[in-house]
Image (cartoon, coloured by chain):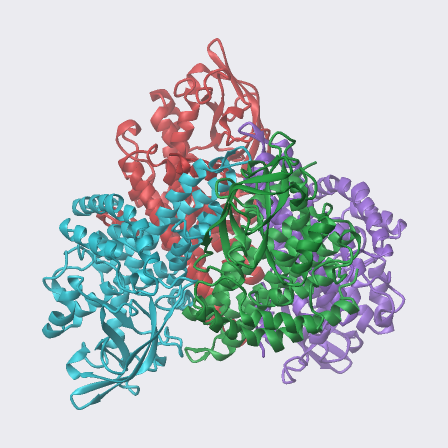
Chain colours: A red, B purple, C green, D cyan
Amino acid sequence: MDFAPDDRTAELTAQVRAFLHDRVLPAEPVLDAQLDATPGEWSLRPVVRELQDAARAHGLWNLFLPAGGATGPYGAGLTNLQYAPLAELTGWSPRLAPVALNCAAPDTGNMELLAHFGTPEQRERWLEPLLDARIRSAFCMTEPDVASSDATQIGTRIRRDGDELVVTGRKWWSTGAMNPDAALLIVMGKTDPDAPRHRQQSMVLVPRDTPGVTIVRPLTVLGYDDRDHGGHAEIVFDDVRVPASHLLGGEGEGFAAAQARLGPGRIHHCMRALGTAERALALAADRARERMAFGRPLADQGVVREWVANARIEVEALRLLVLKTAWLMDTVGNKQAMTEIQAIKIAVPRAVQAILDHVMQLFGAAGLSGDQPLAEMFAGARALRLADGPDEVHLSALGRAELRP
Amino acid sequence: MDFAPDDRTAELTAQVRAFLHDRVLPAEPVLDAQLDATPGEWSLRPVVRELQDAARAHGLWNLFLPAGGATGPYGAGLTNLQYAPLAELTGWSPRLAPVALNCAAPDTGNMELLAHFGTPEQRERWLEPLLDARIRSAFCMTEPDVASSDATQIGTRIRRDGDELVVTGRKWWSTGAMNPDAALLIVMGKTDPDAPRHRQQSMVLVPRDTPGVTIVRPLTVLGYDDRDHGGHAEIVFDDVRVPASHLLGGEGEGFAAAQARLGPGRIHHCMRALGTAERALALAADRARERMAFGRPLADQGVVREWVANARIEVEALRLLVLKTAWLMDTVGNKQAMTEIQAIKIAVPRAVQAILDHVMQLFGAAGLSGDQPLAEMFAGARALRLADGPDEVHLSALGRAELRP
Amino acid sequence: MDFAPDDRTAELTAQVRAFLHDRVLPAEPVLDAQLDATPGEWSLRPVVRELQDAARAHGLWNLFLPAGGATGPYGAGLTNLQYAPLAELTGWSPRLAPVALNCAAPDTGNMELLAHFGTPEQRERWLEPLLDARIRSAFCMTEPDVASSDATQIGTRIRRDGDELVVTGRKWWSTGAMNPDAALLIVMGKTDPDAPRHRQQSMVLVPRDTPGVTIVRPLTVLGYDDRDHGGHAEIVFDDVRVPASHLLGGEGEGFAAAQARLGPGRIHHCMRALGTAERALALAADRARERMAFGRPLADQGVVREWVANARIEVEALRLLVLKTAWLMDTVGNKQAMTEIQAIKIAVPRAVQAILDHVMQLFGAAGLSGDQPLAEMFAGARALRLADGPDEVHLSALGRAELRP
Amino acid sequence: MDFAPDDRTAELTAQVRAFLHDRVLPAEPVLDAQLDATPGEWSLRPVVRELQDAARAHGLWNLFLPAGGATGPYGAGLTNLQYAPLAELTGWSPRLAPVALNCAAPDTGNMELLAHFGTPEQRERWLEPLLDARIRSAFCMTEPDVASSDATQIGTRIRRDGDELVVTGRKWWSTGAMNPDAALLIVMGKTDPDAPRHRQQSMVLVPRDTPGVTIVRPLTVLGYDDRDHGGHAEIVFDDVRVPASHLLGGEGEGFAAAQARLGPGRIHHCMRALGTAERALALAADRARERMAFGRPLADQGVVREWVANARIEVEALRLLVLKTAWLMDTVGNKQAMTEIQAIKIAVPRAVQAILDHVMQLFGAAGLSGDQPLAEMFAGARALRLADGPDEVHLSALGRAELRP
């Protein structure tokens, strides 16, 4: 057992940290200004493009994608364990850092899907421009009418009609899909409702401009429309026709592909969330040292010290749990790491939400406003507790496994 | 000891409940549509005016204001204990119900101040149009640069210059002040920084259109700008001159007046928050009965039952605590009720926030969006934990009192 | 609505408080010494008898038992609401005060059963000596082999054999039954396993010295054997024969009688627990003012203040909930008060346990030892979370009711 | 970074696990019977001696003590990281497993002190018989009159009088000291109250039978006297004279030695506590599968699953944190690992206490009794929150460090 990072991880961590502090954090007010100047617009702002150019120039690009095996020549070749600390650093600036490094959800998961399951044609048409950040993409799974954590309930239908696939259904929370540059929608639907439970679903690649695709409206998360990264869309698919070659992976493999997509995604989400917590704690420390109340800095108050201490403990313990999960995925595979993958999905977002709640409190009303990044981070952590199914579903599954003889 | 409401309370409760269900709740989507149709506008929407007319016609108007004593002929004559259940009902629809009955903060507190401390001229010019809902008002106390819970730190200065008072300072979180109809700003500032700690502050009435008043910008709470009720403004007062007759109450009485304003305000806030929790629990019960996951309704899941049970227990216990606080204020006065006033200020918003968090979780991502009232209610409950000073300040004071010999 | 106690309550409260401070609290070290001097003995110690004599002389005797109606001429005639604050005061000294006033469980519940359901002969033989504290009693319901919260699972059988009832089964947690003076055991068993779910059980009066009754062993709660009040026994009933006239109430009425016994019992338990919390908070305040660490008293530490404040808030809110429950029982009956009776059963013991845990922490290791009453109180509060069924069963029932359309 | 244990750890873990299941767990009821048969006795029972012989024969002996450096030829030569999983396993049976392997507190810490700071004569006289389990020892630090977490407050005085040291003071919570075989007491006291804060204290070796040493009384922890391992004593030192050569380490080095003793001790305590939690979870799983309520096993209830899942998550995360702390101690030293050492001291005992509380609840009243090991384990976890200073002191220190610029 060894808790020291390897050399490549240490080196990349230092580079990403420097990029974060030198380039990304200073760009945050620039993004705010560009967003204020462009109400109603959903595409990436110029400052993001500039950061992307800089990151590419520094070789900090597509770090999330493992090399070798099915993913072929594309990725940076990092293991999950090596990438994890880099993901954490991007969580310090969730609106800018992940996208700057072309490591932002949902594109990361979509690129993984294309790398693992795509045909050479699919890869050429979609994966390469995504890896190059020339287009963006969305993942269309959640539906308004059913509990999506129960995969058998998915209502969207994909039927074959000659050489075509016909998609009909209603999706929402398709993150990024408000962005007109999100050229690709990966849509999950049922190809065979009579197949066994986990063989009913398939995925299909639908260009966003296909006739029958209607972007109905943007959704908000605690008041935020997340315009900076393409928002969250409700989308109707009304007899949308694509060539049969747009099937991603085999028929009936949608559920398995979605599961495969989840493992790395949770490492990324959780590490980013921990980075967000670290940023918040750093802000809290500054605030506590500077803000005076009743004649002394907030940092001198026992109550502040106590919750900061508890936050530190939780972040340290949970980071180790996420790293171990990444290590398990790298060494024994996602399936053997199921308990841990569930565990971090449950534990990290709620801990980070609670920490952000505390830090907002320390900032007073300013903490709730746009003057600090905290409130928007809070909304993000809150949403994570529902992403890929509510915590409660995962707790139940984890508990069931634990009680099995 | 008797836990039954008196006849007048029972009767008014029934009337307000009927008004809520018949008129207010159906108006919520209308408000949403009118808000969508008028981006960037901060004044009350037509649907609010219609509800106000209906409430006035039903005699459900200005119920918050006690009759008799200093408040003279204005109010409905209810005690705090009698008004409390009505405030709770308005919490079911926080954007519409309080304002419909002309019982919305900050106007309520401002009307109380004017009724208690205003000269006949001040009452005529400001109180009467407020009671009549012809104008709106704001209360300018919190400042960006200091911890406002420590009254000695207030930076705004009010100096006398002949027959005039000159106000200089920067305020924020002046709720309602983005609304151009908020004709009156009640501003707290220091008239004598050398006076004893609680005699330094005074209040002055500043018409919003006085030269030197600059409405700098709106603030957001989580992602909400609260456009429906005039938002939250940052305001600069730059050598703003008003006649000396605009002083509200005596010089040096600002702190005491602010304290007097707080007691009833906390009853109102807390009861409304409990009403919000009741609305959320009602929505939760509907959702849990209807939503199916893994073959059965959510209502059949033990985990859902357990948190709903805990929520019910907390709401019942805290409602009684608020009602007892109201009763103490009515019988022994705000000063003797200090511990209880602090207690409810601390306990109710955090409990309601936690309940809303749970209910949002039950609704899945829909709970975070604008499709349910939950997320905006959550932002409101979260903000309450900071209104009138963060919980931590009140916990410390309450604990200190408890540990006194 | 009125939160002031009536005159009789106020007067009795003052008398009981004086008795508590003048007689009971000073007797605690005497009891400790008498317990130390008599290892292995289970009957009441002399100091208890002296306190009982004093209480009787002051007219503070059997206050728990309502007058009138079914209970006939026996009780003090207090309503549940009137008795509740007296029960709270006895919770300050749980080993001595309840028994001193002849208001200790399980005798109180047993006396209520006899008063409500007993025949004149049963009352004469058992109720009168209990009211007179000449004997003690136990209630034998819980069984080691089944979840007793599910009444249908009770394994003890009561069969009729001519003029006799024959009892066979194994009970445990029969509180008080180690005491040889516990002349009466009230035993719950099934008379008809084929009857409808809640008509299967009956209660029978079994003298402790009946052949076939074997007191197997005492049980401990955490490390306490509760020798002062007769401990908790495991008892085997092996073809125990009593006359058929020993049936208490009608055949098949055992479940209903047990339910009737629970309502007042929970008021008593909960109010006593709150009294325990008040004692602990009083001890905490003394400790916090006197104990120095790092140059200042513990009372000056914000963390101490904060948890004390939170404890105060919880105690105040929960006391009101218990009082309201008592009032509901008095005015609309136990059945209509079911939600509240469940609510206090759940909420009070866990809150009191948490408060005691905090106060023990404040006392350092001394808080865990016999030098303070805290640890034994903690064990008592912990046990309450299981008495009459674990919290979880009640939470589930309450939640189910709340989610019903 | 690598989360796999090394070969030696894996091998020893398997051996200790086998010994635990084959020998230790079956011996638990034997210990209970021997304890029941010998009330009032404080020395080790025969079953312990038999287990010690068996462990020695298996080479599972003194595993806790590192080899090399100052500790010379004594220990098994394991690093903290290697020993940690073995300590965890001993926590499954806290009364028997640690002592069986001669790895029980406080002897472990005392042996470390002697190994690090003892003279050859001191080692020969005390360390060798301790390593051989021929004697036992106690550590006398905590005092009844002061907050011992504040080292400057220690009241015991050690003054030099010619060739002798004279010890005067009162200690309590001297674990193990009721055992007449505890031949050695290591006593902390002030040699120079005027020296700098952390140079005032020294340690002295006092044979338990020295004139002037009075074992005043045993103390209890939540009702338990811990007779199996020598209890917890209050001890008076009344002008106790020992040769000056009994000073352990240099004069003024007592504080530093105590600190050095703490680091490994916390690893041991925390790992054992996690083992206790694992045992409890294993018992919970058995119980939940077997116990029926309302027609189905408890394992089918969502509420049970949820808390079991949460317990699993916490145990996994905290174990990693303890292991990382051990690794830091091994690689960068105790001083650099201070934050982590504090973190685990705070986080582990409270988590384990909460888990035990849940598991007791699952067992109903049986969980509180001596029929399950849970209640006594609970008392142990509760006591850990105070051992080496209350959590609050450590939280404050950790928070202060976190808020430092």
Q: Quadrant of residue A81?
A: top left
In the shown orientation, is residue A119 left or right of residue B132?
left
Q: Quadrant of the C terminus of chain A?
A: top left
- On the image, the x and y values in percent for residue D211 come to 24, 82
**Is residue C312 at least partly visible in the picture?**
no
Q: Nearer the viewer, residue D163 or A389?
A: D163
The x and y percentages for residue D186 are 24, 74
Outermost residue toward the top?
A: A162
* Rendered position, B310 above or below C282: above
How many marks the image carries: the answer is 0
Q: Which residue lies at the image location 70% right of the left edge and 63% below the top edge?
A: C63
Q: Is residue D371 above or below residue B125?
A: above
Q: Residue furthest bottom?
A: D162
Foreground pick, C40 / D163: C40
The image quadrant that residue D258 belongs to is bottom left
Q: Seen in the image, is B268 located left or right of residue A323?
A: right
